[in-house]
């Protein structure tokens, strides 16, 4: 009987020791202490606001006794979402931002890729200077950048407009057909250097032996760039594209600033501007529904692009 109890104690003791290591002890407390500074702000300032906005999107404001009666908030199901999908201004803003993304994102990423390849070539001197210069626009806040460019777009203030007029050209950067591309130019100026730095960092991780082997086989610098470098950094290009899709659907600062000097930008020019305009009219539930729809569209487009490209690239 004593031997049986001794053997049972020997079996149970290691199990208790393992549970103690997994569920407590200094190591577990250290892990928790390192995770709390991330998870606490993440929950308070991300998950809670998202959850609150989602709840608000299912509420509606009713009135008792007609137009001048007492208002009260109640659960309305998908009524707010029905109004969003029936809103012509919402679909117009989605169409505008879709056209913006189809043109601006490929142009920006192509320029960023060319700049990254140029920085990676041994033919370019003073690389540190060019790298810092290309990245500097990203350090400028979006609102400040839009203000700077609005000065260059203004027909009354811009020296660029004056020079073009002197050459016989009469550009209207704030006209109905050009103002969207003026905003796209500001975004391109801001974010090209950022995307270039991501691609350039990926290029720096490629082993030099790969280039040497290609040169021995007679490959030119052009062939090395497009047949070796670009395919190898494809994950970085995909990543920057996903970031750009998300950023496009969040466009707000540039058109909001340009709206101050152009009558061709309405308060509903982009989806985010529409949500802000609706919220400014104290219709927070409708604004929440618009925000949720924008978030879902952003998730579907970015995740769909990520799945499609990674599957084709075999990543």
Image (spheres, rainbow, N blue to C red):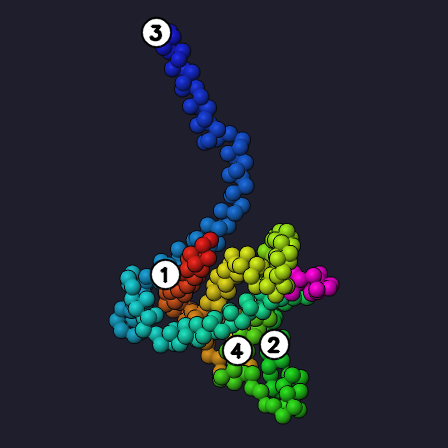
Residue found at x 55% / y 68% = 110
Q: Nearer the viewer, mark 4 or mark 2?
A: 4
The answer to which quarter of the image holds residue 260 is: bottom right
Compared with residue 181, is residue 5 higher up or lower down, i.e. above or below? above
Q: Which residue is mark 4?
A: 181
The span picked out in magenta is 116-132
User: Residue 56 got which mark?
Assistant: 1
Q: CA distance from mark 3 to mark 4?
A: 88 Å
What x and y, as percent, mark residue 197? 61, 60
Specify whether 195 is left or right of 74: right
Along the line of sight, which residue is nearer the eye, 13 or 36?
13
Q: Position of residue 28 (x, y in %)?
A: 50, 34
Q: Residue at x 52, y 34 (%)?
A: 29
Disc 3 designates what residue? 1
Q: Earlier in the sequence, mark 3 or mark 2?
A: 3
Q: Nearer the viewer, residue 75 or 67?
A: 75
Q: Which residue is mark 2?
A: 149
């Amino acid at each position: 009987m004593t031997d049986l109890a001794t053997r049972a104690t020997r079996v149970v003791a290691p199990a208790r020791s393992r549970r103690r290591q997994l569920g407590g002890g200094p190591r577990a407390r250290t892990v928790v202490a390192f995770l709390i500074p991330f998870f606490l702000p993440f929950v308070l300032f991300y998950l809670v606001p998202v959850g609150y906005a989602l709840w608000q999107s299912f509420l509606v404001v009713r009135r008792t006794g007609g137009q001048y009666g007492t208002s009260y908030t109640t659960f309305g199901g998908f009524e707010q979402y029905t109004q969003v999908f029936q809103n012509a201004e919402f679909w117009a803003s989605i169409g505008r931002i879709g056209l913006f993304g189809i043109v601006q994102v490929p142009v920006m990423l192509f320029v960023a890729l060319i700049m990254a390849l140029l920085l990676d070539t041994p033919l370019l001197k003073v690389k540190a200077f060019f790298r810092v210069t290309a990245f500097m626009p990203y350090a400028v806040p979006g609102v400040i950048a839009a203000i700077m460019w609005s000065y260059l777009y203004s027909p009354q203030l811009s020296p660029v407009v004056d020079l073009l007029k002197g050459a016989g050209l009469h550009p209207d950067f704030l006209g109905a057909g050009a103002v969207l591309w003026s905003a796209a130019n500001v975004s391109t100026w801001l974010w090209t250097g950022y995307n270039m730095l991501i691609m350039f960092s990926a290029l720096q991780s490629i082993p030099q032996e790969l280039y040497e082997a290609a040169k021995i086989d007679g490959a030119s610098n052009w062939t090395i760039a497009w047949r070796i470098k670009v395919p190898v950094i494809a994950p970085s290009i995909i990543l920057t594209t996903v970031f750009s899709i998300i950023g496009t659907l969040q466009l707000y600062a540039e058109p909001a600033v340009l709206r101050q000097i152009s009558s061709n930008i309405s308060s509903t020019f982009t989806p985010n501007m529409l949500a802000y305009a609706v919220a400014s009219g104290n219709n927070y539930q409708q604004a929440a529904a618009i925000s949720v729809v924008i978030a879902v569209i952003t998730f579907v487009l970015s995740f769909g692009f990520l799945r499609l490209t990674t599957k084709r690239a075999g990543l």
